[in-house]
């Protein structure tokens, strides 16, 4: 895990407030943080939705010409402005030279995915040959599990968190059914302790140590979709492999959000989508990782011709020359228009760097946490204000940019009022609202305005008993 910064976000906020001779919750703190933010210009690389264009907005409550407060990059990232340019380049090439586009131009279609793998490798911390861009996340998860999950009478379980994202849950269930296994016996789910929302790393490691001999595959989220908890990937990987398990991760909410070093950590396999923090658009092309140590031992269970070596692929002799590693798992030609969308975003990441983005993210989300904790009560006996609780871990190494917050008033009511005022976030059952300030395009002033709006909403709400 990345080390904690020398100065915690709360200390930074308080220090700046002292220098500015104002209260830490004063607007001047937010404006100063934006002024000294070295990444602030990247916001101009994206289209920020206007409040007036959002369907739920009540125009009587807002200035319709202002930008929305978009805190939903954990669900769908904003559109990079270069996407249209790159799409038009390929559409123009298709119109003018048709089939010749497979082999010529800035991004020949036959190797379109390979043309941007170099931009992806630093985001996930892998070698280029360990990455394939293909399919959608759950499709890739199935392909990986078909090869890594080989149950035996003694080693037949898959270990995961109890409230994994439904698609992962369904994928694991179906893989177990495919092997004729009993789901209740083979699907080992770890739950948080009674009264807690998130998992303790010591509890995860204890289960691995005690039950590892019966576990074939460990599959965890990198960052949990609901709680925002960032799991200790290297610790889980090391513990699982020490017990003879393959260890893989769904990085949907981690990629582009936290720093990853999949190769150095020795992770066996991983997969991710690209439409959240990677800003590639809904249904964007997904990614898969297989560590190079498995390049010549782990083979795809299902094969297509794009897993065949390019140098002999068009001999059409039906004699498979499988590409070693994850690229051998590719089945069909890459969708070039989806490649374009991802390309536009990855170029921005290359300029910004994950290290710098993560540094800003820690402070940005820390500022949000600071304002929430200082504006809203926790104890009904101690305050008459509505209670706001953050269920995301407070330790910065245990979270990404997302905070999941719950309320003593119905989250549906709070959510609807936020939407009316041009705040884009989302609600998730049972009672959470997910708020994700993204360092590429969100500002500290966005955070300040959000908490002000939240305050006005809660001030008019009645607390529930």
Image (cartoon, helix red, strand yellow):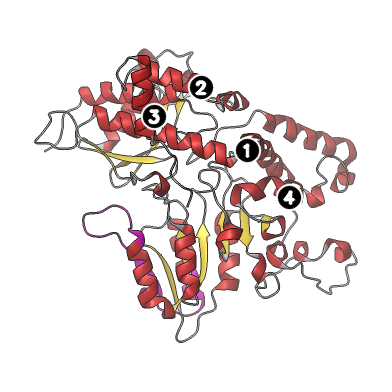
In-image side of 98 versus 462 (left or right): right
Q: Earlier in the sequence, mark 2 or mark 1?
A: 2
Give the labeled residue for mark 4.
113
Q: Which mark is residue 349?
A: 1
Residue at horizontal 56%, vertical 36%? 356
Give the labeled residue for mark 2.
36
Counting from the top left corner in percent of width and height, residue 13 is at 37, 27
Q: Which mark is residue 377?
A: none
- Numbered range of the magenta stretch: 174-201
Q: Earlier in the sequence, mark 4 or mark 1?
A: 4
> How far is the residue under mark 3 from the one under mark 2?
13 Å
Residue at horizontal 88%, vertical 44%? 104
> How far is the residue under mark 3 from the one under mark 4?
41 Å
Q: Does 188 lie within the magenta span? A: yes
Q: Earlier in the sequence, mark 3 or mark 4?
A: 3
Counting from the top left corner in percent of width and height, residue 53 is at 50, 21
Residue 33, located in which quarter of the rendered image? top left
In-image side of 341 versus 275 (left or right): right
In-image side of 194 versus 299 (left or right): left
């Amino acid at each position: 895990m990345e080390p904690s910064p020398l100065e915690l976000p709360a200390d930074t906020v308080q220090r700046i407030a002292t220098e500015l001779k104002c209260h830490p919750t004063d607007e001047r703190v937010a404006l100063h943080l934006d002024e000294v933010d070295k990444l602030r210009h990247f916001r101009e690389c994206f289209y920020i939705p206007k409040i007036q264009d959002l369907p739920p907005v009540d125009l009587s409550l807002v200035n319709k010409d202002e930008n929305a407060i978009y805190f939903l990059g954990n669900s769908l990232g904003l559109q990079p402005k270069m996407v249209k340019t790159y799409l038009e380049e390929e559409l123009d090439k298709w119109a003018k030279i048709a089939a010749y586009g497979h082999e010529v131009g800035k991004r020949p279609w036959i190797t379109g995915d390979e043309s941007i793998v170099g931009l992806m490798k630093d985001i996930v911390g892998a070698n280029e040959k360990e990455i394939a861009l293909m399919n959608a996340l759950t499709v890739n998860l199935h392909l990986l599990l078909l090869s890594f999950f080989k149950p035996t009478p003694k080693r037949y379980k898959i270990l995961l968190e109890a409230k994994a994202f439904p698609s992962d849950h369904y994928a694991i269930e179906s893989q177990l059914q495919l092997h004729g296994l009993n789901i209740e016996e083979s699907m080992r789910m770890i739950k948080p302790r009674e009264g807690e929302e998130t998992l303790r790393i010591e509890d995860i490691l204890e289960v691995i140590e005690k039950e590892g001999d019966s576990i074939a595959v460990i599959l965890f989220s990198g960052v949990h979709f609901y709680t925002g908890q960032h799991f200790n990937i290297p610790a889980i990987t090391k513990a699982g492999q020490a017990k003879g398990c393959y260890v893989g991760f769904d990085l949907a909410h981690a990629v582009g959000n936290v720093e990853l070093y999949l190769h150095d950590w020795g992770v066996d396999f991983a997969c991710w989508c690209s439409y959240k923090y990677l800003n590639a658009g809904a249904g964007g092309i997904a990614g898969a990782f297989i560590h190079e140590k498995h390049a010549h031992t782990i083979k795809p269970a299902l094969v297509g011709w794009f897993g065949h070596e390019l140098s002999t692929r068009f001999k059409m002799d039906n004699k498979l020359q499988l590409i070693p590693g994850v690229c051998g798992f590719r089945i069909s030609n890459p969708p070039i228009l989806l490649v374009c969308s991802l390309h536009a975003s990855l170029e921005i990441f290359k300029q910004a760097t994950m290290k710098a983005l993560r540094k800003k993210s820690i402070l940005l989300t820390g500022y949000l946490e600071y304002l929430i904790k200082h504006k809203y009560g926790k104890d009904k006996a101690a305050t008459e204000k509505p209670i706001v609780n953050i269920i995301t871990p407070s330790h910065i190494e245990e979270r990404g940019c997302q905070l999941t917050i719950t309320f003593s008033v119905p989250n549906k009511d709070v959510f609807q009022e936020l939407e009316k005022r041009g705040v884009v976030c989302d609600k998730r059952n049972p009672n959470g609202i997910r708020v994700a300030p993204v360092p590429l395009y969100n500002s500290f002033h966005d955070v300040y305005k959000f908490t002000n709006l939240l305050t006005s909403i809660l001030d008019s709400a009645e607390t529930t008993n």
